[in-house]
Amino acid sequence: MNSHQFSDAEIDAVYRAIRERRDMRHFVPGAIEPAQLARFIAAAHHAPSVGYMQPWRFIRILDPLLRQALYQHVQQERAATAAALGQRGDEFMRLKVEGILACAELLIVALVDHREKYVFGRRTMPEMDMASASCAIQNFWLAARAEGIGVGWVSMFDPAHLRELCQMPEGSQPFALLCVGQVEAFYPAPMLETEGWDQRRALQELIYENSWGNVGPADPVT
């Protein structure tokens, strides 16, 4: 036994949160306690970041008019996405893709300005700031799932428009809209899977050995 590992119950809880995390679009009325939201944000802030740059910033949307403006903009982008999808456009429009007006809390996760000064780990891959912020969002998501709170990640927006709406500095980048709130139930599987949009790939198809496309022996993990 590894002396550093958690108890069996704690390990099971971590893996359960990972398995049962869902991108939620359906919310029911009910507030989120301030201390609870603070825990989720603190979990996000404990995420790893390349060069310890901690590029994430969180904007809590409290103004109803601003929330409505964000909703309207996302709807415009939704229509543009449908047009870009061509023959799958109608199918896409039948999907529920956000819960902006129904969720208890709406947050913008953004990348800080002046990121060019952070070179450690980013000299050849500047996009690692985005990877770091993604880790923060995942931490938030898992913490919320563990406490029975739903989170939905909305990415259909023009960053420049959101930057203007929220009076963000030049060089900053809105990265995600997070809808956070009470749910009646968590989806039994990812919604895009149950709706037939796509399905999870078999793990064996995603693991190569030594070179791209070189599939090793079948992995026992499913």
Image (cartoon, rainbow, N blue to C red):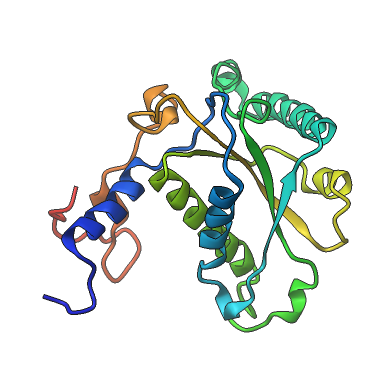
Q: At 74% across and 65% down in the image, what residue appears?
A: 112
Left or right: where does residue 184 sit relative to residue 204? right
How many numbered marks are there? 0
Image-based side of 85 in relation to 184, left or right: right
Percent position of residue 150, x then y? 49, 37
> Residue 61: where, in percent of width, then height?
75, 42
> Is residue 97 shown above or below 37?
above
Residue at the spot 54% in from the left edge and 26% down from the top edge: 27
Image coordinates for residue 133, horizontal then vertical, percent: 59, 61
Can you tell which quarter of the image residue 200 is in? Answer: top left
Q: Residue at x 59, y 34 (%)?
A: 31
Which residue lies at the image location 86% right of the left edge and 43% below the top edge? 165
Query: Is residue 185 or residue 169 the one in the foreground?
Result: 185
Residue 212 higher or lower than 62, as above or below? below
Q: Residue furthest bottom?
A: 120
Q: Is residue 190 left or right of residue 5?
A: right
Residue 96 in the image, given as x and y percentages of width and height:
56, 22
Check the picture and name the quadrant holding the N terminus: bottom left
The quadrant where residue 186 appears: top left
Please tell me in which quadrant of the rendered image residue 120 appears.
bottom right
Residue sitting nearer the eye, 207 or 71: 71
